[in-house]
Amino acid sequence: MKHVTNYILILFLLCSSVLCAQEKFTLSGKITEASSNETLISVNVIIPELNTGAVTNEYGFYSITLPKGTYKVIVSYIGFSDAIQTITLDSDISKNFSLEESFENLDEVIITENIEKLNIKKPQMSVNALSSATIKDIPVVFGEADVIKAITLLPGVTNAGEGSSGFNVRGGAVDQNLILLDEATVFNSSHLFGFFSVFNPDAIKDIKLYKGGIPARYGGRVSSVLDIYQKEGNSKEFHMNGGIGIVASRILAEGPIKKDKGSFLFGGRSSYAHLFLPLFDIDNKAYFYDLNTKLSYDINDNNSIYLSGYFGRDVFSISDSFENTYGNTVLNFRWNHLFSDKLFSNMSVIYSDYYYGLKLNFVEFDWNSGIQNFNFKYDFKHYLADGFKLQYGINSIYYKFNPGDIKPSTPTSGINSFKLTDKYAFENAVYIDAEHKITDKLNLSYGLRISSFLRLGQDQLNTYQDNQAVVFNNDFQIYQKATPTGSESYNKSDVIESFANIEPRASLAYQLNDDASIKASYNRMTQYLHLLSNTSSPTPLDVWTPSGKYVKPQLLDQVALGYFRSFNDDKYSLEVETYYKKIQNRIDYIDGADLIANDAIEQVILNGEARAYGLEILLRKNEGRFKGWLAYTLSKSEQKTPGRTTNETGINNGNWYNTAYDKTHDISLTGSYDWNKKWKFNANFLFQTGQPTTYPNGQYTYNGINIPSYSNRNTDRLPAYHRMDLSANYTPKPDKTSGWQSYWVFSIYNLYNRRNAASITFGENRMTGNNEATRLAIFGLIPSVSYNFKF
């Protein structure tokens, strides 16, 4: 690894010296939307004379270094009129562009659609981008646009079942996805136990899902990165938009703090179906609400500051006996600074908190748990030359884990106060990424991330004989909890365990011709946090735990190879990728593991390994009255935990077994059709192989009680999952571009009323005494309507 690092440094120096050999100057600046002054991401800045160009970054900044001369500069972004200007480059020039919307098409439909198109030349692969407009067009349950449901229509992405929270990427677990909202970590992405996601599509500016070839600036998870940025707000004039649905409504307001200098954005959503329950003499509640906010201010041409936040809560209660509250809070202060026309920086100070609360009035106690982190990031993007760019930075995160705190809720409660031991940790990283154009056909991206993790002191930590918290019972051939031999106490500043890992990343793109390329990537990633859940879908009660003395960090190695092609001037595109990934130290659970309120979680988990491999195909139609995509994934996801010695059997006899998120076949077809200016129709169809599960394969009788026996883990499957959804968008006055504008969305979820199985349970029929299987289905056919507006 030392030789690899030296090679990268030498290559950086050689490239820098060669590229600086001739006289060159830099053209740089920001690109914004003229009507709102909102910065635009992934705008193309094209220099046709040299057949080269640049693309704006996440903050709308671009920089390109060119030989001295006079050039025509074309700024192009679909949904906007091109900006064309001739520039004489005989010195470094700072030039901002404002793009005017093109009203030949509905802005709600294609204003940012180009972010979804295929880029042949870029080495970045295994990345999917969706615009907010596309997400709003996809039919979903209760008619509420949903980011998480939308990305599960992409290849390599599945959910854990209907009404489940989270998502699985390339055979990975839910906790292996890094979810970022304005750079802040979101630990639970669902409302109402998975029926909705926490992301308000009205407030979203940009969405990217990285499944492989993940840049070195990202770390901490081994499966994927979902990177979401909120809008900054309109700094020219005040606007509002929102929607009213059958179960929830939303509203968003934006406007200038100081015209052309600063802006604000405030958004909110809330469900209200519970308000009608008293009409049916039902004293239960189930609702959510969330708030999005962002303040932006340009101090001068070189400095901008941003303050963004999110707050969300879910409340679920049954009469006066039970109440469950959970949700996320995130806050981010960000400073963008331009050191020069070639060096752009972003500093962020971030707070993130996930809270889970439970009030059990019938037993008179309250339960509180959660995870907090304080995050400092400082990132730089260095445009050294037209064909060579660097990104580098540092990242430090301090964690506090509250596994659980029980308190009596009344003076007469028989429950004693009980606090599970808090855990603390400190995660650090330094990284460097390079984008390198070797030739007109060959482009590389390579980098290195060095991460470290310090498990800090806690009040008490159990000790065990031979450091084995789980022991194997040879007589019964089962794993059991070890008996602690004692305990150790630490100060918060003490380091219980430390880890350090080197994470190289590399990807390349070789352009076969103007319309086709092949790409390959490799990345190693480390995950130091683990979600403790032995269910197929996470629940709010699931607890995160840090790596430490008995829990090792997960290590991923992934390779991917792909073929990418566009047809008919980018009207169609094809992406074909195959991948293989292997994960070390994937936690597994002994049979009968109890994870709730367990203060010695190390007694029920073992370190194993996981692997996943597959083929992904994505065929898109990008333009025309009919647009959409067909996605197909053929994949395998397995896990294995062998015995630690020759006397141990391991989990599942030490053999590979299907993970709970293994889906052999996954097909999704998504389309939209512009019938005319007023009507637009959308549809999607999904088919997935049934989720792995374990059925009983027999039974025996003990003292008159029938006790089932089970087969090996996950050898059975639920029935295949499939459904079709339809929606229609009606815009009464499509030519109206100012004042009150509105449209209606009519949708049908699960058109043919498929009763997809969320689970199948086995039991004895009390009337007949016969064994029977019971299928639980959550949704049937659900029609919905929503009214959406803006002004």
Image (cartoon, grey):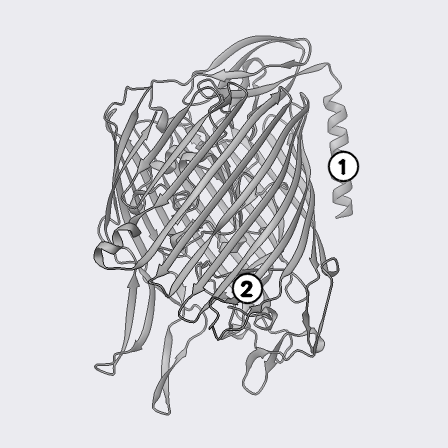
Q: Position of residue 389 (x, y in %)?
A: 66, 29
Please report contact status of discs 1 and 2: CB closer than 8 Å, yes or no: no
Q: Is residue 399 above or below residue 146?
A: below
The residue positioned 55% from the left and 67% from the top of the image is: 588
Q: Position of residue 218 (x, y in %)?
A: 60, 43
Q: Is residue 626 above or below residue 736?
A: below
In the image, 657: left or right of 342?
Answer: left
Q: Nearer the viewer, residue 342 or 734?
A: 734
Q: Position of residue 47 (x, y in %)?
A: 56, 16
Disc sitting over residue 269 in the figure: none
Q: From this viewpoint, is residue 158 visible?
A: no
Which three-letter amino acid code belongs to the residue tagged 2? Gly
Quarter where residue 756 is shown: bottom left
In the image, 466: left or right of 34?
Answer: right
The residue positioned 33% from the left and 19% from the top of the image is: 738
Label whose residue precedes the other's in the sequence (1 or 2)? 1
Q: From this viewpoint, is residue 429 visible?
A: yes
Disc sitting over residue 404 in the figure: 2
In the image, 624: left or right of 489?
Answer: left
Instruction: Look at mark 1 in the image and give the residue it sits on.
Output: 9
